[in-house]
Amino acid sequence: MKVYLETYGCQMNVADSELIRSILVEAGHELSPQVEGSEVVLVNGCAIRENAYRKTYGRLDLLRPLRLERQREGRPFVVGVLGCMAQNMKEALFRHPVINLVVGPDSYRALPDLITKAGRPKEGGHRAGRRAKIKKEIDADLSIVETYSGVEPLRFDGVNAWVVVMRGCDNFCTFCVVPYTRGRERSRAKEEILEEVQRLSEQGFKQVTFLGQNVNSYRTEGASFADLLLGAAEVPGIERVRFTSPHPKDFPEPLLKAIASHPKICKHIHLPLQAGSDRILDLMKRTYTRTEFLSLVDKIRRIIPAVALSTDMIVGFPTETEADFQDTADVVSRVGFDSAFIFKYSERLGTIAARDFPDDVAPEVKTDRIIRLFDVQHRIALEKNRAKIGRTFEVLIEGEDEKRAGHQIGKTEGHMTVTFPSSGQPPGCLVPVEITEASPAALFGEPLRLSVLNAS
């Protein structure tokens, strides 16, 4: 059948869609570039991010006329929700009149058969007319072993490749649904991962980013996450190794020293803060205090002096007071993050917080606080970026800048976006760029043709 796949949410959803494409093609299904003409529409949805959740439902609503048209014509039409959203909501999704397939993130291997079953006529044949029955299929069972070993992701060409090294999470933060939608932690074998990195290098990818719900808790017999990073950095042809998303509790000194020691392991760490109030951190079950977080930042910067730090934060968690919010703003000011993702708290079905804590911070208060925290972070980011003017950084070209004709776009080792006039080099090349302008979110510069970089 012709299958159209859309993805909403985080990098893990993107990586899962690469697995899904591979499984479908291997089974003989045909990937379609558009909804029109497709017999199957799959939406890999997110239960964690509110924006992705809304986009998924918005997309499904747009499919109603097509569902009715196919029913009138008596033609098969499968509409499925996959991933975290499917696992979180399960049978409840079938209340949406368009959906007839629900598959969780540990059941992708079953997709080909489930699509076939959902596409078969119900009660002996498709009947013309609007009342034709829709056959429904679901597989949303969690696994304690599934890592999709042996499935080679089907990727689009590019510079960066997402490589999933572990699945699931054992942390059970009260605001997060991941342990319930992706199960408990399990890691892939180091040898299998490094073989995949080798194949990616042979395919022309210049950067790999290791993914996990708690990526730095990766562990297999005889190998730590530090061992994995160092092994990937030694693969010929790979210029940069990154990872996301980690948890602050899993940064032993050997890991930090591994990052510091190898020139191809990027000196960028995403370090989710979530909140700066000890009371809120305790309610979130984050397992660290603000003092411990600040001590970790000091340790990271001592071992990796040139490190760039980014973070995630939530404003308006249940019972958050103005004093709690000010504690968060204070930590942000003290740390001086290079960039930050800031979210308003929203209840997620199935989380401890949704069960135990009323969402009692008024929407207008959340809006006020997120604006104020954005202002704090923007000032910090602008100051840090303006300090880069006049310096030269090695930039990995990602492609053409769609907003500026004749310009290319790429990333520094610290994961800062840089726009510059075309260097004449293709994506995947490293070029020295002298920074001439800066904004809170990006750098602008001129490409240089130097044999010696003054990168920092």
Image (cartoon, grey):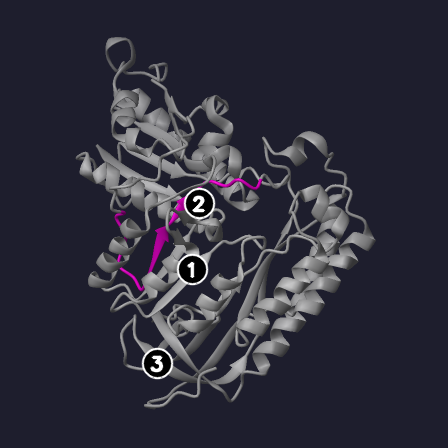
Indicate the quadrant where residue 382 lies: bottom right
Tell me if mark 1 has few (under 14), some (14-19) or many (20+) residues whose alpha carbon lies within 10 angstroms of its own. many
Crowdedness near tag 3: few (<14), some (14–19) or many (≥20) residues, C-alpha within 10 Å: many
Residue placed most toward the observer, 265 or 70: 265
Specify the farthest residue to the front.
222
Image x and y of residue 386, in percent? 58, 81
Alpha carbon of mark 3 to alpha carbon of mark 2: how far? Answer: 32 Å
Q: Is residue 188 visible?
A: yes
**Number of numbered discs overlaid on the protein picture:** 3
Instruction: Please state which of residues 102 and 287 is positioned toward the viewer in this rendering.
Output: 287
Reading the image, the residue beneath label 2 is 8
Q: Which mark is residue 431?
A: 3
SS of the residue under disc 2: loop
What x and y, as percent, mark residue 398? 35, 68
**Mark before the other along the chain sequence, 1 or 3:** 1
Q: Which amino acid, by three-letter code, is at mark 1? A: Ala
Residue topped by disc 1: 226
Identified by mark 3, the residue type is: Val
**From the viewer's perspective, is the residue at label 3 or at label 2 nearer?**
3
Classify residue 295 as left or right of residue 149. Answer: right
Q: Earlier in the sequence, mark 2 or mark 1?
A: 2
Is residue 35 something that shows in the picture?
A: no
Q: Main secondary structure of the magenta part?
A: loop
Magenta region: 153-171
Spatial distance from mark 2 to mark 1, Cα to Cα?
30 Å
